[in-house]
Amino acid sequence: MSTERKVALVAGANGVIGRNLVDHLVSLGDWEVIGLSRRGGADRGRVRHLAVDLLDPADARDKLGGLTDVTHVFYAAYQDKPTWAELVAPNVGMLVNLVDAIEPVARGLRHISLMQGYKVYGAHLGPFKTPAREDDAGHLPPEFNVDQQNFLEQRQQGKAWTWSALRPSVVCGFALGNPMNLATVIAVYASISKELGVPLRFPGKPGAYTSLLEMTDAGLLAKATVWAATDERCGNQAFNINNGDLFRWSELWPKLARWFDLEVAPPLQMSLETVMADKEPLWNSMRERYGLEPSFGEVSSWRFGDFVFGWDYDVIADGSKARRFGFHEFVDTEEMFLSIFDELRKRKVIP
Ligand SMILES: NC(=O)c1ccc[n+]([C@@H]2O[C@H](COP(=O)([O-])OP(=O)(O)OC[C@H]3O[C@@H](n4cnc5c(N)ncnc54)[C@H](OP(=O)(O)O)[C@@H]3O)[C@@H](O)[C@H]2O)c1
């Protein structure tokens, strides 16, 4: 364990990525952690929460101006918007406001870690070159992840701190009230199917049932993020981070259904956003019957589910650069889903 003081500022501490990162930093035992989000949270042990609106530069300056001890910034804040173009201004603006506020005061700043994704490779636009590699050619804007990285690269010139960028696939872990949460989409969709006495049908595009995919466990991603932020060789580098195994829904779907004691019937393409629009009263009756905690709004990432289940093309990136640089952890994707379902049940998110 290093004796140097390490103070992490985690932006997006309530998100599926940020929340798991905070937990991992705490588990390491030698980090002080400041969690940043609009909602804030209850302080516990080595974690202090700050409620800050990063869209507001004055609020960022006011609330972050006293954080002189921060040594590492982990940026995983995110503003959802309906179009790819609309994502750019708020998401680049939040990062700029944070760096403008923290860089002048945190004299011992050593690293800024940026959470990205496969959108850097155009994965959201349609079939793209796979497996994607970190040095693949770029594509036309708008794309906020690329703009964020360009901003950091320019700001870092001549500075003592370094940056790293993490590029996970779909990230799976526990979180509530966030727009991109595939494990919860599947768990709630399956629970509602069971309640209505219907089998579990894959709701995506026909070709999406057999395309080749991979996932990223939020706990694995947290380990990789801290590794990249603290291993000198990773300074000013980007890394694909995925579980290390590949799958097709056609093989995995029946195994997930089994956890819910559900039969599988042939896929039937439907928009989850559309078919879930009238399910809030049903969810409320399930909450009462099974003592479930979250509101329907807190478990509804249906638009994200439709997006992921619409990938009728391979969505895979080469994870070997991280291994070459020294990160060797992996996660079994089937076990990952089942253990998240266990946790959702334990936390009374699903029956
Ligand atoms: N989830 C995935 O499957 C996935 C996959 C690949 C890449 N990524 C990328 O990873 C990054 C993080 O995604 P995520 O899914 O973890 O996001 P998320 O679950 O939606 O979390 C976003 C976090 O940002 C905070 N936030 C939002 N607006 C804010 C503001 N104005 N000021 C301060 N904090 C704000 C939110 O808390 P409050 O609401 O309390 O402010 C929350 O803690 C994004 O760039 C995303 O594209 C995600």
Image (cartoon, rainbow, N blue to C red):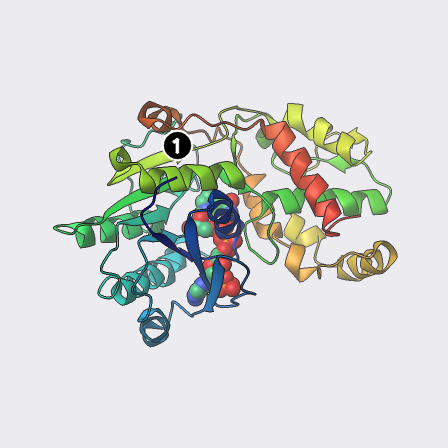
| 222 left or right, relative to 268 | left
Where is residue 8 shown, x and y percent of the image? 38, 54
Determine which quarter of the picture holds residue 129.
Answer: top left
Residue 262 in the image: above or below residue 131:
below
Say whether residue 279 is visible. Answer: yes
- Residue drawn at point x = 47 percent, y = 46 percent: 29
Where is residue 126 shown, x and y percent of the image? 44, 37
Q: Answer yes or no: disc 1 within 8 Å of ligand 1.
A: no
Q: Could you say which is closer to the camera, residue 6 or residue 187?
A: 6
Q: Which residue is at the far front?
A: 3
Where is residue 78 shown, x and y percent of the image? 44, 57
Determine which quarter of the picture holds residue 326.
Answer: top left
Q: Which residue position holds label 1?
A: 128
Where is residue 50 shown, x and y percent of the image? 45, 67
Residue 193 in the image: above or below residue 253:
below
Q: Could you say which is closer to the camera, residue 234 or residue 275?
A: 234
Element class at badge 1 = loop
Q: Could you say which is closer to the camera, residue 245 or residue 109?
A: 109
- Residue drawn at point x = 31 percent, y = 27 percent: 325
Looking at the rendered structure, the number of numbered marks drawn on it comes to 1
Say whether residue 82 is visible. Answer: no
Q: Could you say which is closer to the camera, residue 181 or residue 104?
A: 104
Image quadrant containing the N terminus: top left
Pointer 1 local density, CA inside 10 Å: few below 14, some 14–19, many at least 20: some
Question: What's the residue type where badge 1 is placed?
Answer: Phe
- Residue drawn at point x = 49 percent, y = 49 percent: 26
